[in-house]
Amino acid sequence: MTVQVTALTDPDRTSAGHRLAWLACGDDGDPLGYAFLRLFTRQGQEHLAELRLNVHTAERRRRVGTRLLDAAVAAARENGRRSVVAQADADTPGDHFLAASAFRKVLALTYARLALAEVRGGRAGEIQAIVERPHPGYRLTSWRGTVPDELAKTFAESRRAMDDMPMDDTDYGVVAWDVERVLAVAKAVADRGEQLTTVAVVDASDGSIAGFSEFVVPGDGKGDGLHYGTGVLPEHRGHGLGRWMKAESIRLARVQHPELAGLVTDTADSNTHMRRINDALGYVPTHKALEYQLDL
């Protein structure tokens, strides 16, 4: 079988980057697989590209994936990238393909889910108690969608809380955040038809944001929501703020989206602190994923 790989035009362009795309077809023109390569363009990540590649189950082991990968890697080099990252669930064909294609394993992630229907009775009371427990010098706030104007600057500054997030050997870079990027992320979520909620802790002494936790829910409020990130600035750690925000996120998800089935989070295996928080709040591990990296 002859495999024809065709570069496509992808209109998906944001202020943080854009994607290149390829479609693999057989002799009869039927699609066999595809690949997307996201080229990050924001300051701090200009060296990085992210690969998504999929081959139809019936067409695997016929070098379709290799042809798509060759095209993506060549484009990454042409665009001056030094690292290509890709993720696959553990012990799946994608996992084995990346391992056999010169990618190296750089990060292990555990996915966990909280079934919201099971948050009732004593467990609901425990979460409410965590939310209501005083944290002297701090207060909780939250918003849906775009951050309020009066908090935009300090919220953007608080994003450095993620700079030392455990990423093991991943060449992720240090993401530069500003108000423009914060607004762009909220707009991207809204444009997809999804709903973003942000919980934040405010330092009562000066009104600045000391930490944040975000989750995104499908537009119809059903199915599972996804936690985006939870971070506390280094100078405010050690006060239980991460647990406080995560508990408030659960409470808000149940109140705002009564038909939501669950909340899903992914955490680096090396991030033992956040994994302990998830375990204590009732999140149950569902599966593991592996982050791979190709050094160019």
Image (cartoon, rainbow, N blue to C red):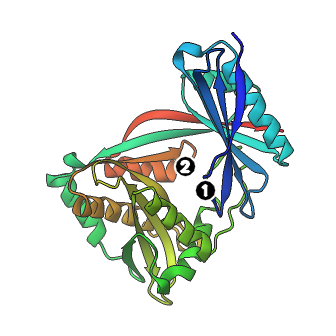
Q: Name the residue at 50% across, 71% down.
A: 211
In the rendered image, the quadrant that contains the N terminus is: top right
| Badge 1: residue crowd in 10 Å (few <14, some 14–19, many ≥20) | some
Give the residue furthest to the top. 1
* Closer to the camera in the image, 44 or 270: 44
Label 2 sits on what residue type? Asn
Label 1 sits on what residue type? Met
Q: Name the residue at 52% across, 68% down.
A: 237
Residue 170 point in image, percent of width and height: 70, 45
Q: Secondary structure at mark 2?
A: loop
Q: Name the residue at 70% across, 16% down.
A: 63
- Asked if labels 2 and 1 touch by Cβ distance under 8 angstroms, the answer is yes
Q: Which mark is residue 165?
A: 1
Give the residue furthest to the bottom. 206
Give the residue furthest to the left. 121
Tag 2 residue: 271
Q: Secondary structure at mark 1?
A: loop
